[in-house]
Amino acid sequence: MSQQGPILVISHAPQRSLVGLLDEAKLFPLIETDWAEAARAVNQVEPSAVLVAMSQSGDADLTPLAARIAARKLYTPLIAVEPAGPLAPNAIPFIQGRGSLDRLLPRLRAALRVRALHATVLRRLADEATAARLPQEDPLCEATVLLMGRGGSYPALSVALGERMSIAGALGMEAAGKQLNSRGIDGIVLSEGFTSRVVDAFLTVLSEDARFRNLPVILTTGELAPRYKLPNLEILIGEPGQIAINAAPLIRQHALEARLSRTLRAIDAGGRIDPQTGLLTPAAFDREFATAVRQTLAAGGGLSAARLAFEGAHARAQLDGARIISHMMRQMDFGTMRPDQSVVVVFAETDLRAAHTIARRLSSVIRQTSHGAGHARFEPVLSVATLQPSDTASSLLARLDRGPRRAVS
């Protein structure tokens, strides 16, 4: 893999095993430096990734360096090898533990793929005058983590993680599977309450499914060795607050990757897709909806629409709801987030009863997400309408807006 820049290794002492591993994997050019020269090296060599050996270093060494790296325009992965305490927001932890140092290679390659994706998006945005700009807020603000467990640490982890990102909870493996298949997840945290055999089976399934293989997976107990083909699997043991702090960089990186993928799809669609939600832009939706109504009236068939309003919900909850809908929609359906932050979804070849069923399914998944430190959940307010022979696109939307509204139960 071309890095478009050297890999920088920073330490207080020579790291023969680490450097040898990278050299054998042909991850070069490779530059070693000590902490005294670290800041200058980052500025001069413009590294594609930075690895820091933390065994003899503390947070005071890492924090200013991490801030300098985070300020770079192009994403530069920062991996902290063997950290002893809480990390900087962009410092991805790597703890060898009972595993092999070789696990560092797939983690580094996964991070470099995110960097390459970022470079592609920046290049494409420079060529697209009409494309939306990349959001500037912290990707962690867009992240949703799946918290699994039934043990005593679950509530404390829920609070610690909820202060930083949205949470989808699962008390069992079946519920976790449904969550993974119905929404975009940026990381998994497994707390206590599962046997080693159950966790082993779950991790094996994840490693065999290409959709989930690169997900950050955080184990909070040391019962299993990290031997799975999951490049972002990490074992973090400690207080819930520290676990949340050190899990956040991996989750943030995945959320950044998801943001970049949405932006790239929006560019490929000629600006018709909103990169924040994955739904059509309002203008593109209006054109698509008018065409769908006209064709359905001419050829016959069913066409229904649902409006999901997030009344009283904060902006993050509204955005989460829109993304869940985008993730779950059938390929033949389309939707948009309107200026009032409600989402309208159009169901092709669908009668009123079936549209109600689909809309309730979407709403049930949205209701299971907690947002922010208060873990607030919200009830989408739903109205559904179906196309009548006398309808136009405008009249159907108007009926949808003034239709009976109720929180979905």
Image: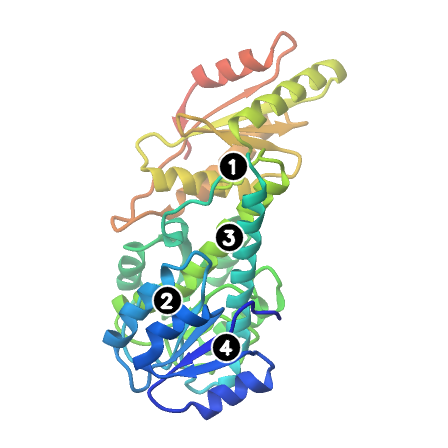
**Residue 267's spot in the image, x, y percent?**
59, 41
Amino acid identity at mark 3? Ala
In what quadrant of the picture does the C terminus appear?
A: top left
**Residue 344's spot in the image, x, y percent?**
50, 28
Amino acid identity at mark 4? Arg
Query: Mark 3 sits on what residue?
Result: 258
The foreground one among 42 and 157 is 42
Q: CA distance from mark 3 to mark 1?
A: 13 Å
Q: Specify the farthest residue to the right.
A: 299
- Crowdedness of circle 4 by 10 Å Cα count: few (<14), some, many (20+)? few
Of callouts 2 and 4, the N-terminal one: 4
Q: Residue at x 42, y 43 (%)?
A: 320
Amino acid identity at mark 2? Ala
Of callouts 2 and 1, the N-terminal one: 2
Marks 2/4 in contact by CB < 8 Å: the verdict is no
Left or right for 226, reference 25: left
Q: Is residue 284 above or below residue 327?
A: above
Of callouts 1 and 4, the N-terminal one: 4
Q: Looking at the rendered structure, which numbered label has been put on residue 247?
A: 2
Q: CA distance from mark 3 to mark 4?
A: 31 Å
Amino acid identity at mark 1? Asp
The foreground one among 370 and 143 is 143
Q: Which image quadrant for residue 46?
A: bottom left
Q: Residue at x 52, y 53 (%)?
A: 178
Which mark lies nearer to you, 3 or 2? 3
Marks 2/1 in contact by CB < 8 Å: the verdict is no
Q: CA distance from mark 1 to mark 4?
A: 42 Å
Of callouts 3 and 2, the N-terminal one: 2
Q: CA distance from mark 3 to mark 2?
A: 17 Å
- Crowdedness of circle 2 by 10 Å Cα count: few (<14), some, many (20+)? many
Query: Mark 4 sits on what residue?
Result: 197
In what quadrant of the picture does the N terminus appear?
A: bottom right
